[in-house]
Amino acid sequence: MIDFKLYHSVADLPETWDKLPVEDVFLKTPFLKALEGSSPTNISTYFLGVFSSERLVGITTIQRVEMYLDDVFRKTSNQFFKRCGKVLISKIVKGNALIIGNLMHTGQHGMYFNAEAITQDEFLNTISEGIDALTKTIRQTFDKKIRIIGFKDFFEDDPIHKSELFFRRQKLYKAQVQPNMIFTVRPDWKSPEDYINSFNKKYRRRYKTARKKSKGIQCRELGLDEVRVVSNELYQLYQNVSDNAGVNSFKLHSDHFYSLKFQLKERFKLFGYFIGDQLVGFYTLILNHDKLETYFLGYKQELQHQHQMYLNMLFDMAFFGIQHQYKEVVFARTAMEIKSSIGAKPYPMHIYLKHTNNVIANTVLKLVVKYANPVREWDERHPFS
């Protein structure tokens, strides 16, 4: 018999949760504890266990996202689209959404099941039952209606696309979103020098220029106590970048970085950029088995152009991946062109989505998705010889 159980806290998860052979730190309890203790104010995470004959065979994270205009819209230069977008969001998206996965990070980090114990369709059907139960609980507890349900993010070769009948029956449509930019570490790169030497002349020159501009800035890793001391500064630097995103669906909790460092320990790396004693930028990494996941970053906007801070951060992240022999450095979506200039390649991704109000056609929701997360035209760079 296949059944499910919903959990509202990491503390309630069964002991067998972490014993499942899941090679994804985003589904393990240390990360989930960090997230639970420092989630954005508009995101609540629930956990679903799928059982076969009372044995845990699948797990899912489901995020309830409360969509507020101040969280969704940040600073933007296009006031016309901002006004139009606000009208559209308030009519269609404003309210509660249930997202199967982690809205705060690019990639499929929300589901796992044992394919020897349960089929994919059985797993998805059980998740659907869990979503229905959670929808009722939220309505009864908070008097809120779920407007949107979404499954995120899937590469084109993900087996989930074989369950087309399930998504059609659930009236979830497939939409393409911005690609995940992934940097593959070549076996012949034993050091950052090997990587830089594989550039063609144009991009080797570009690298040298960026490094010259970064002189005067010291980069060093921060430990737990240091992260706690500069927590407010980190958050301000993060906001500098986040607020310029134009459209976003959350703001991090001010203690998010400290919480992650506390729970993940050496699996979470935070590197600060200093001019003298002043913190002027930072980037974070999550060590996810053979993948190095780039996470949030921040910097002083007024120093970005002068020191090419973002480009230098990308190089430093790539260097870390090479030095520690990761197979991939996951640079996530956005800023595709500059990420491709250091060697990352785009991998298309899809989500499955629906509006729960049948009066609102999915075609209208597609327009909102396109506005909030457009698949932009961009020029891919090819830095290698």
Image: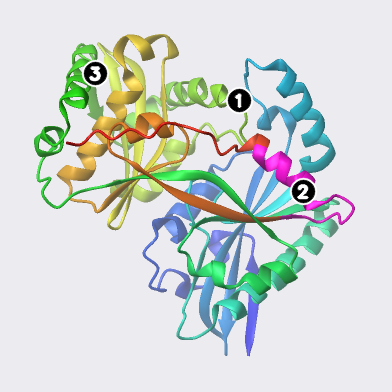
In the picture, measured across the screen, residue 155 lies left or right of residue 191, that is: right
The earlier-in-sequence mark between 3 and 2 is 3
In the picture, measured across the screen, residue 360 lies left or right of residue 368, that is: right
Residue 302 image position (x, y, % from top left): 42, 9
Residue 243 image position (x, y, % from top left): 56, 23
State the SS at label 2.
Answer: helix
State the SS at label 1.
Answer: loop
Identify the residue at horizontal 74%, vertical 18% (top origin).
80
Question: Which residue type does callout 3 highlight?
Answer: Ala
Q: Which residue is mark 1?
A: 246
Residue 137 image position (x, y, % from top left): 78, 62
Instruction: Point out which mark residue 100 bears.
Output: none
Give the camera-side residue of 367 and 126: 367
Mark pair 1, 2: CA separation? 23 Å
Residue 121 image position (x, y, % from top left): 60, 78
Q: Is residue 67 above or below residue 99?
A: above
On the rendered image, what quadrant is the C terminus found in? top left
* Marks 1 and 2 close (CB-CB < 8 Å): no
In the picture, measured across the screen, residue 355 lies left or right of residue 303, that is: right
The earlier-in-sequence mark between 1 and 2 is 1
Q: Which residue is mark 2?
A: 363
Question: Which residue type does callout 1 highlight?
Answer: Gly
Question: Which residue type does callout 2 highlight?
Answer: Thr
Identify the residue at horizontal 18%, vertical 44% (top origin).
322
Q: Is residue 18 magenta?
A: no
Q: Which residue is mark 3?
A: 210
Identify the residue at horizontal 36%, vertical 12% (top origin).
305
- Bounds of the magenta segment: 354-370
Using a 10 Å C-alpha cutoff, classify the residue at mark 3 as few (fewer than 14 neighbours), some (14 to 19) or many (20 or more): some
Q: Is residue 358 magenta?
A: yes
Whether residue 298 is visible: yes
Mark pair 1, 3: CA separation? 27 Å
